[in-house]
Image (spheres, rainbow, N blue to C red):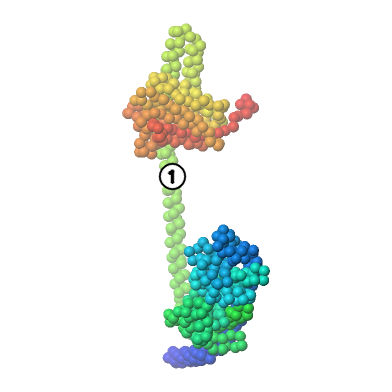
Amino acid sequence: MTRSADIKHRGSTRHWALGLILGGLAVLLATLVLLLPGLERIYLGQLGKREASTLTLAVEGLTGSLRRFEALPGLIAERPDLARALRDPSDTALIDRVNDELHLTAEEVGLSDIFLIDPTGLTIAASNHWKALSFVGRNFAYRPYFTGALAGERGRFFALGTTSGERGYFFADAVRDGSEIIGVLAVKFTVDAFEDAWRDGANEIVVLDDAGVIFMASRPEWHFRSLGPLSPEARAAIEDTKKYPMDRLVPLQTEQEPFDDTFRQVTITNDTGPVERFIVQSQMIPEAGWEVSLLTPSEQAWTRAIGTAAVSALLLLLVGLIATVVIQRRIQMQERIAAALSMQEELELRVTQRTAELETANRLITQEVEERRAAETLLRQTQTELIQAGKLAALGQMAAALSHEFNQPLAAVKSFARNAGAYLDRGEPDKVRQNVGLIDDMVDRLAAISTHLRNFARRPGEKTEPVLLNRALDTALVIVEPKMRASGCRVSRDEIDGEIWVQGGQVRLQQVFVNLLSNAVDAMSDVPDPVVDLVLDRDGGHVHVRVRDRGTGMTDAEIAQLFDPFFTTKEPGKGMGLGLSISYNIVRDFGGTLEGRNHPEGGAVFSVTLKLAEAPSLAAAE
């Protein structure tokens, strides 16, 4: 088959598939037109049956409330105070007591109002006596519940209260003195709670009286409306009993048609214009003469009908699409077979080209690997040279530190030697011996410092072990004591309770405290009464030693550079700027911290935090 013939064949096949789809769409539209009305009717019936339980619950709730309150007027009317009040309504104390009793009873049983009426229809006591719109003094002789109870029957009536303006159901019973009827006791309960509960549902509920007026509804705008015109007799009876406001007795715009033996269809055109369709079912409450109707929106059934029709249409469309896809797949398969033959040669050519490209890339990768190996070798050599340069730099720093660190012990040795000579002249050999011993200690310390600085380049360090903090502080104070005495400085020190062992090295720890104490003395060279505070406190597994001076403190820039090598705030020739840097590294080697800041009350404070350690055992000490 030539290429032009193949294109013509494929075009005719596609036109045939398009015709199949258009035919399916035509069938779909016809199906929608035929199925929708019948489907809607089926779903309307199902919807009504499903919602029948909602109507039953509403009827049972209303019936239960009616039966609950029906017997209450007769029971309350038996109270002796009511008969006495009707006989002597001028007894204000009795009337007040009756008012309070009726108010308490209404609160206990959940009634809206309870009121006592004399034979003329005048209310002489009521549970709402204290309200602005009280029933007391109102005449209800026109109400059917009053006339029925006065005749010895149980009165019942639903109406809009002419005093309170609240809709409610009234029960009334006669108040007797012996066999004589001397008045009427009436009770009222409101229906707002029922309507509030109905509004939470998806349906609308209305209650019609024997005249066909809607006096209860889930929609407040339907109150006192009707589903049809009222007869003149019904309107006259409503007007005579003042049952409802006459100006609101306007029928709803409705169209009704039967659906089956149980349901009917109602279309309501609202005053604002929208039209609503409902499937309606009703039940009677015979003792009250009420008709309770449940209005279920028809939109649900219409939506389900649309959905079912749409699903059916989609199924038909799916069948058509499947057929179209099968045809197109066959056409595509034929095209792929033809294309595969033509592409086979092109593929072989590409494989040959790709193989050549891979060989070239392999050679480039091998060359890159060799270049990277050479670079790594050069990098190692450079790193070795950098390490060596770092060691030489450290040795240079230690050479400078050696001069700084020997100055303090040598000054102490010189001071102790002078003191020993003075004590020798005074003939005080014990003090001479004490100073010689201190000089011996200083020599040992010089040897230890020399050993520490000599080994600093390779950082072996003195190993950390439990050391006595008390001894380190005492020795440091002894070393700095001559300098402090010369400056007129004194130490305010906390008493140490018992031995405190910390993790560190004895000589290096002394060196830290000597540096801190010496710096504190130097910081107060211009202070009239220099005092160094030495404070210790424990916190969990750590101990904090704080050295505070009373000098001028430090700036933020100085605090940021405190522990940098060769940084000092002292005058030239009085410091090399290495003491705090060395102390910082020593404390860090011990697993602790060294911090410096300004004290809130003035001066600077340096805090050394060390880990607490257990005292070495006797066997270890030996």
Split into 4 quadrants, where in the image is the C terminus?
A: top right
Query: Dot 1, how many residues are within 10 Å of its Cα: few (below 14), some (14-19), or many (20+)?
Result: few
State the count of labels: 1
Whole-percent x, y for residue 179 in the image: 67, 71
- Residue 116 image point, x, y percent: 57, 67
Query: Front-most of 489 and 511?
Result: 489
Which residue is located at x 45 percent, y 46 percent?
Answer: 380
Q: What is the secondary structure assignment of the residue under circle 1?
A: helix
Residue 169, above or below 400? below
Q: In the image, is residue 21 above or below residue 567?
A: below
Q: Position of residue 399 (x, y in %)?
A: 40, 30
Q: Which residue is mark 1?
A: 383
What's under tag 1, amino acid-wise? Gln
Does residue 373 lie above or below 557 as drawn?
A: below
Residue found at the very far right of the displayed protein: 178
Q: Residue at x 50, y 36 (%)?
A: 592
Q: Is residue 410 visible?
A: no
Percent coordinates x, y for residue 471 in the rendering:
52, 25
